[in-house]
């Protein structure tokens, strides 16, 4: 009975570990996809901001060049001065440039935050990969250990009298019974089946045939 409990508890633990690993991997890939989309949005916004900044800088340069011409003219003719509309344009362009500078700084800040988040995601992915490898190693070790235990039990029950082995198999779990009989030579397993209760023997036989199809 103690061996039966060990066989059932450890597979349940491995199943839960695999399930937890799958959920974590899905969450990390969702985070990675979200950050990738955010990177594309930030890149597009930065490109638009830079294009607008260059355009308005060119406009400001034209205005300033016109201002220099006006200044030279004003030196010759003091009666000439900036018009009210020109002064308003210069003020508006200065305000727009300040806004664009702030926006560019914010985009750079977000880009840095995104890079840090991507590095963190890469780190978690590496950790999950290591965890997956360790879990797979545990599963392989368990499978080898379980097979070793089954082989030992097969030798034990095969060496017993068929009648005594059949009496034990009548009260044994179906999956364990099938695994043990499947590991025996046909002559030994058929001898035990012939001594088992008819209902249990039929069910075990059906399982053995199904596994071999």
Image (cartoon, rainbow, N blue to C red):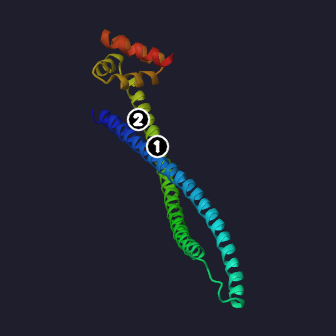
Give the residue at x 42% y 28%.
155
Give the residue at x 66% y 84%.
80
Asked if disc 2 and disc 1 are in contact, CB closer than 8 Å, the reply is no
Q: Is residue 45 left or right of residue 11?
A: right
Towards the viewer: 55 or 179: 55
Towards the viewer: 15 or 51: 51
On screen, 109 above or below 11?
Answer: below
Towards the viewer: 124 or 148: 124
| Residue 180 screen position, x and y as percent | 41, 25
Q: Is residue 108 left or right of residue 208?
A: right
Judged from the image, the secondary structure of the residue bearing numbered disc 1 is helix
On screen, 97 above or below 23?
Answer: below
Which of pointers 2 and 1 lies earlier in the amino acid sequence? 1
On screen, 17 above or below 156?
Answer: below
| Residue 93 screen position, x and y as percent | 58, 72
- The quadrant holding residue 158 is top left
Q: Residues within 10 Å of mark 2 (few under 14, many from 20)?
A: few
Q: Which residue is mark 1?
A: 141
- Which residue lies most toward the top here? 198
- The quadrant holding residue 63 is bottom right
**Separation of marks 2 and 1 at Cα, in angstroms:** 12 Å
On screen, 52 above or below 174?
Answer: below
Q: Quadrant of the N terminus?
A: top left
Q: Which residue is mark 2?
A: 149
| Residue 13 screen position, x and y as percent | 35, 41
| Residue 2 screen position, x and y as percent | 28, 36
Q: Residues within 10 Å of mark 1 (few under 14, many from 20)?
A: few
Residue 100 numbered tag: none
Say which of marks 2 and 1 sits in front: 1
Judged from the image, the secondary structure of the residue bearing numbered disc 2 is helix
């Amino acid at each position: 009975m103690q061996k039966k409990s060990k066989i059932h508890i450890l597979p349940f633990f491995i199943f839960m570990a695999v399930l937890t690993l799958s959920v974590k991997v899905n969450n990390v890939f969702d985070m990675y996809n979200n950050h990738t989309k955010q990177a594309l949005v930030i890149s597009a916004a930065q490109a638009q901001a830079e294009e607008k900044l260059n355009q308005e800088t060119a406009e400001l340069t034209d205005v300033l060049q016109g201002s220099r011409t006006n200044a030279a003219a004003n030196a010759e003719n003091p009666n000439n001065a900036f018009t009210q509309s020109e002064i308003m344009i210069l003020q508006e362009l200065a305000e727009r440039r300040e806004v664009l500078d702030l926006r560019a700084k914010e985009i750079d800040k977000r880009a840095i935050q995104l890079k840090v988040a991507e590095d963190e995601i890469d780190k978690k992915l590496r950790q999950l990969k290591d965890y997956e490898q360790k879990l797979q190693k545990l599963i392989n070790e368990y499978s080898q250990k379980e097979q070793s235990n089954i082989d030992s039990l097969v030798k034990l029950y095969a060496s017993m009298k068929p009648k005594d082995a059949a009496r034990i198999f009548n009260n044994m779990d179906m999956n364990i019974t099938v695994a043990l009989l499947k590991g025996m030579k046909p002559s030994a397993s058929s001898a035990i089946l012939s001594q088992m209760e008819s209902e249990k023997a039929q069910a075990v036989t059906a399982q053995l045939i199904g596994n071999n199809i």
